[in-house]
Image (cartoon, grey):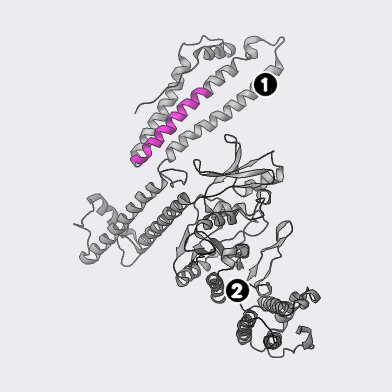
């Protein structure tokens, strides 16, 4: 391959040598040393090309050229630094410029640090084609499609070899296998502890099939991101911009953010890029949900960054005349902590077309030990979320985590309460209700809306959570629905009893069967009121059915005293 050798300043190299040595400088010595280093890098690049797909050769050449250029610049700067002040052994101690020497040594340290960074280019050359395919690569989708095709071919080939072996009880003459491959498979089978070993065991096929699914999902994700029109926003003291060319979400501040803001940005994966003068992170759908958590970059509109994206995508498809509905599907992430900590091996997002499939996958992973182990606190001071279950609209425009496992407990994620499209969709709420019934939540720690924005709410048992959103048969939902319906039927009640919902929740939680029975009777009385709106009457009927189911579920508890003052729950 052709390589460009960049010029070395021989004059500066001679001056640096004369300022630090008693010996004569050999003309061309600096250029000779430089070319020797570049030649070593060329040899490394050629060896790497022999081991990887030809599609990576151009990238290797680019890294090699950048290495040669940066190394020449670094060495020329080093010669200029070394020539500034002669060595004390050459100049002598009389009137030696100590301060200048200190500045020279500091410049040498900076130059050496830069040289070490340049040497990392060699590690990059060694890694080309041997790791994953970066989303920053403009050819990522094409490369992933080629990888997917190769994996599928390997899967079919392994299945065919197993079928041949099962039929013939030997690998001799197996189509598509070389003699070396046959011997390697026979040796592996001879070392197996299994009673009836196969050329390719089930776990090998399963693992390869999992990689096929993950690769297909990455193709789908990258294609969707490429076709999505993301939107930036203004925040107090700056703005967020979408850089499609660099594949980054970039945050630009009018003034340097304070230390706390910088620390928060770093904790959420944003990095300062001096070359563009911005804090940035890779552009994908996840980055906007991360941005939701950083108060310093909250949009001036008061919306969440993720809500802006949903709104932007939904605007062309929604009008007052033609509203649309969506089919909600489920996804599972085996370990969300790999996303939060930017782990090198990130758990894939697995999508499922039915609740049954998603639940089966969730149940399969739920018992894994990592879901119960203690984790260091995340930037919010909470245990990291591990196994995660979420919902996504059929058009891909709306998605939200619903259930996150934290140190062995199922936490409800209440992000849906801040997403109008999700919380107002009956189908989505039915799905949440089914998750609550068939999988179950243990706790919830959400956010409450205040005048200054969303603030963290206490971490409480799900049983006590004020839940007017979906059917869940819990004390908190019973109290919330009861309170809201009573207030709607009698607006004066809200003004007179602003804190009654919490009181009702506590009573229902403590009295269970008896307390719920009393509430059901009260709601039946309200339902018979004259002049009640039909919508309210229908809601009352549905809630009474919920209460009946709740009573049937908890049942009367032996020895449980009835409510001493039943009027406490009445209007």
Q: Residues within 10 Å of mark 2 (few under 14, many from 20)?
A: some
Q: Which quadrant would the N terminus be assigned to in this image?
A: top left
Q: Is residue 295 magenta?
A: no
Q: Position of residue 368 (x, y in %)?
A: 52, 65
Q: Position of residue 117 (x, y in %)?
A: 54, 32
Q: Secondary structure at mark 1?
A: helix
- Which residue, given by chain and number where applicable, does mark 2 sit on? 470
Q: What label sits on residue 337 in the rendered view?
A: none
Near-viewer residue (570 or 475): 570
Residue furthest front as drawn = 321
Q: Residues within 10 Å of mark 1 (few under 14, many from 20)?
A: some
- Which residue, given by chain and number where applicable, does mark 1 sit on? 103
Up-down: is 499 above or below 189?
below
Up-down: is 97 above or below 478?
above
Up-down: is 444 above or below 109?
below
Residue at (26%, 52%) from the top-left corner?
181
Q: Main secondary structure of the magenta part?
A: helix
Q: Number of labelled discs?
A: 2
Q: Which residues are magenta?
A: 54-73
Report which quarter residue 410 is drawn in: bottom right
Q: Secondary structure at mark 2?
A: loop
Near-viewer residue (538 or 101): 538
Up-down: is 98 above or below 338?
above
* Residue 81 falls left or right of residue 459: left
Q: Position of residue 167 (x, y in %)?
A: 22, 66
Is residue 503 visible from the viewing direction of this image? Answer: yes
First-in-chain label (2 vs 1): 1
């Amino acid at each position: 391959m052709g390589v460009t050798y960049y010029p070395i300043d021989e004059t500066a190299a001679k001056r640096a040598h004369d300022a630090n040595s008693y010996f004569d400088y050999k003309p061309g010595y600096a250029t000779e040393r430089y070319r020797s280093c570049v030649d070593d890098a060329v040899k490394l690049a050629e060896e790497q090309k022999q081991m990887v797909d030809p599609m990576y050769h151009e990238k290797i050449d680019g890294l090699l050229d950048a290495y040669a250029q940066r190394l020449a610049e670094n060495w020329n700067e080093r010669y200029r630094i070394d020539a500034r002040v002669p060595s004390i052994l050459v100049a002598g101690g009389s009137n030696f410029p100590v301060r200048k020497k200190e500045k020279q040594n500091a410049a040498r340290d900076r130059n050496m640090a830069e040289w070490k960074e340049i040497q990392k280019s060699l590690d990059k050359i060694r890694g080309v084609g041997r790791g994953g395919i970066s989303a920053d690569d403009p050819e990522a989708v094409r490369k992933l499609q080629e990888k997917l095709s190769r994996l599928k071919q390997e899967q079919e080939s392994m299945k065919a070899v197993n079928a041949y072996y099962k039929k013939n009880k030997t690998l001799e003459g197996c189509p598509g296998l070389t003699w070396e491959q046959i011997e390697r498979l026979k040796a592996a089978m001879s070392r197996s502890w299994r009673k009836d070993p196969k050329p390719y065991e089930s776990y090998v096929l399963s693992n390869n099939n999992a990689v096929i699914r993950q690769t297909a999902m990455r193709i789908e994700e990258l294609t969707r991101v490429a076709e999505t029109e993301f939107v930036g926003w203004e925040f107090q003291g700056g703005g967020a911009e979408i850089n499609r060319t660099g594949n980054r979400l970039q945050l630009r501040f009018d003034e340097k953010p304070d230390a706390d803001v910088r620390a928060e940005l770093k904790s959420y994966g944003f990095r300062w890029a001096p070359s563009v003068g911005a804090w940035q992170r890779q552009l994908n759908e996840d980055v906007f949900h991360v941005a939701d958590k950083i108060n310093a970059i909250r949009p001036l509109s008061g919306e969440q960054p993720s809500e802006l994206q949903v709104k932007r995508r939904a605007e062309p498809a929604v009008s007052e005349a033609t509203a649309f509905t969506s089919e909600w599907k489920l996804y599972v992430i085996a370990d969300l902590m790999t996303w939060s900590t930017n782990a090198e091996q990130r758990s894939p997002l697995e999508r499922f077309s039915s609740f049954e499939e998603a639940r089966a996958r969730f149940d399969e992973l739920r018992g894994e030990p990592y879901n119960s182990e203690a984790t260091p606190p995340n930037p919010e001071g909470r245990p990291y979320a591990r196994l995660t279950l979420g919902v996504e609209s059929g058009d891909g425009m709306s998605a939200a985590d619903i259930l996150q496992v934290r140190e062995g407990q199922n936490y409800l994620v209440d992000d849906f309460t801040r997403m109008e499209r999700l919380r107002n969709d009956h189908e989505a709420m039915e799905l949440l209700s089914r998750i609550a019934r068939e999988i179950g939540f243990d706790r919830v720690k959400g956010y409450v809306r205040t005048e200054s924005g969303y603030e963290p709410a206490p971490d409480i048992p799900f049983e006590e959570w004020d839940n007017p959103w979906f059917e869940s048969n819990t004390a908190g939902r019973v109290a919330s629905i009861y309170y809201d319906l009573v207030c709607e039927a009698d607006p004066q009640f809200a003004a007179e009893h602003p804190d009654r919902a919490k009181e009702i929740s506590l009573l229902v939680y403590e009295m269970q069967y008896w307390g719920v029975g009393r509430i059901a009777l009260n709601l039946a009385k309200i339902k018979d009121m004259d002049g009640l709106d039909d919508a309210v009457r229908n809601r009352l009927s549905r809630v009474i059915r919920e209460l009946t189911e709740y009573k049937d579920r908890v049942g009367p508890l032996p020895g449980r005293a009835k409510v001493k003052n039943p009027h406490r729950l009445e209007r």
